[in-house]
Image (cartoon, rainbow, N blue to C red):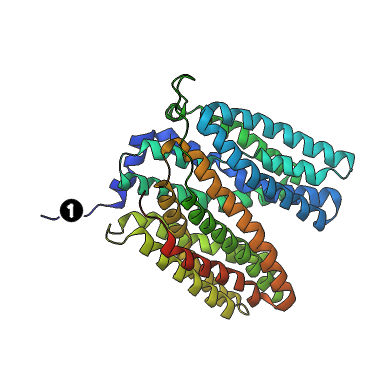
């Protein structure tokens, strides 16, 4: 007899049973500060200094600080437990924000350094949440569903976060937008840190605490894949922005880019329905090919916002599944005791990739036209295809 088909509702209804209903809301809202901070820093520093260049440098320094800080915090959490580490990071983050405001008020040259401090202490809930699912889920089906949920709320956060920054900045001020990220960190990251699920990450007594296993070198493959995915995000955003400016409608660029999240969210939610026979390595290859197709369509459609919107939508169909697939494969490579560090490494890869993709894509789009900006997306997709055969699918 064949087992009856599993519905989306039955798969996702297991998550609140596993972690608790409040957990899903807390982990979703707790990742908003990461989505908001870079744009909020860019807007505030630009408005205060009167220079977009200074604002861009500050935002880039914040991203670099985040990429460096997240793995360190993850490693500490694996050794000391998530609650104590996250609460400490939230406190340091609020102090760092105070330092940024002080640097802006003084008008000195310390603003980029202060912005780096804000990024260095930015609490990344998504990696910690995935690390908790590694311990809370009992089998591969539950874990894949949990990771699909994580990918969906990541997409939602990176749509809602920048929108909140823009709305608060317009209605009140850029200062209020950055203060809002501080408030969200203080409330929701702290709530996530103290949620009862933190107990599964608490360290045992010092005498009985085992030495955490080393992270194997094969982790480099999913980290490079996340670097490629970050480049896809950064280059797509700059390419779409350049295309919108070229046709005299720069304000629509963000709306066109947001279409990628529609396709991504839909396919990510439905990812749990794929048969087990469609293995992770095959899924990785199909996703890489789909992203390459999307890059080509975007390059061909760069002269028309209507056609470009459709191309971005197609490209987005493969974004969420790629992220979930890479995270799922990475989760098989280490013990749950090193989960926070591993997921932090993946997050850092995305952050560095976004910065790299945005810089390269922006330079190509400005120098040779919007279509050339999407060549960075194509290069990242090719890297994913090269990495696919190397993807380790079991420990």
Q: Is residue 192 visible in the rendered structure shown here?
A: no
- For residue 87, which quarter of the picture? top right
Q: Is residue 142 visible in the rendered structure shown here?
A: yes
Residue 289, image x, y percentages: 45, 71
In the displayed structure image, the side of residue 268 where residue 308 appears, left or right: right
- For residue 101, which quarter of the picture? top right
In the image, 94 versus 218, the foreground residue is 218
Q: Residues within 10 Å of mark 1 (few under 14, many from 20)?
A: few
Residue 147, image x, y percentages: 41, 48
In the image, 52 versus 307, the foreground residue is 52
Q: Residue at point 47% right, 63% down?
A: 387
In the image, 224 versus 120, the foreground residue is 224
Q: Residue at point 55% right, 47% down?
A: 345
In the displayed structure image, the side of residue 186 where residue 47 appears, left or right: right
In the image, 350 versus 194, the foreground residue is 350
Residue beneath label 1, please? 4
In the displayed structure image, the side of residue 272 where residue 384 appears, left or right: right
Secondary-structure class at tag 1: loop
Residue 200, image x, y percentages: 42, 29
Residue 297, image x, y percentages: 53, 77
Q: Residue at point 68% right, 31% down?
A: 92
Reply above or below: 190 against 276: above
């Amino acid at each position: 007899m064949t087992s009856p088909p599993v519905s989306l509702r039955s798969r996702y209804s297991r998550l609140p049973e596993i972690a608790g209903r409040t957990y899903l809301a807390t982990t979703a809202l707790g990742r908003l500060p990461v989505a908001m901070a870079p744009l909020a820093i860019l807007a505030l520093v630009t408005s205060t200094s009167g220079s977009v260049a200074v604002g861009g440098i500050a935002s880039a320094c914040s991203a670099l600080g985040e990429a460096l800080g997240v793995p360190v915090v993850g490693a500490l959490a694996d050794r000391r437990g998530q609650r104590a580490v996250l609460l400490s990071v939230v406190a340091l983050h609020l102090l760092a924000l105070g330092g940024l405001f002080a640097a802006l008020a003084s008008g000195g040259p310390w603003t980029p350094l202060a912005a780096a401090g804000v990024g260095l202490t930015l609490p990344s809930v998504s990696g910690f949440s995935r690390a908790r699912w590694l311990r809370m889920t009992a089998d591969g089906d539950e874990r894949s569903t949990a990771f699909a949920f994580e990918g969906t709320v990541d997409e939602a956060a990176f749509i809602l976060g920048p929108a909140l920054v823009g709305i608060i900045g317009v209605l009140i001020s850029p200062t209020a937008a950055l203060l809002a990220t501080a408030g969200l960190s203080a409330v929701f990251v702290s709530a996530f840190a103290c949620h009862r699920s933190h107990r599964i990450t608490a360290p045992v007594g010092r005498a009985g605490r085992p030495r955490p296993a080393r992270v194997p070198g094969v982790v480099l493959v999913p980290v490079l894949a996340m670097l490629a995915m970050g480049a896809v995000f950064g280059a797509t955003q700059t390419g779409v922005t350049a295309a919108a400016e070229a046709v005299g409608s720069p304000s629509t660029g963000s709306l066109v880019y947001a279409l990628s999240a529609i396709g991504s969210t839909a396919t990510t939610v439905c990812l749990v329905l794929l048969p087990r026979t469609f293995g992770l390595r095959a899924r990785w290859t199909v996703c890489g090919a789909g992203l390459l197709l999307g890059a080509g369509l975007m390059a061909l459609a760069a002269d028309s916002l209507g056609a470009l919107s459709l191309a971005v939508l197609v490209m987005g169909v493969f974004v969420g599944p790629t992220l979930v697939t890479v995270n799922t494969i990475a989760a098989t490579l280490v013990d749950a005791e090193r989960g926070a560090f591993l997921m932090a490494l993946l997050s850092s890869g995305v952050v560095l990739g976004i910065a790299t993709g945005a810089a390269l894509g922006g330079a190509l789009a400005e120098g040779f036209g919007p279509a050339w900006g999407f060549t960075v997306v194509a290069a990242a997709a090719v890297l994913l295809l090269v990495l696919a055969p190397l993807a380790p699918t079991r420990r």
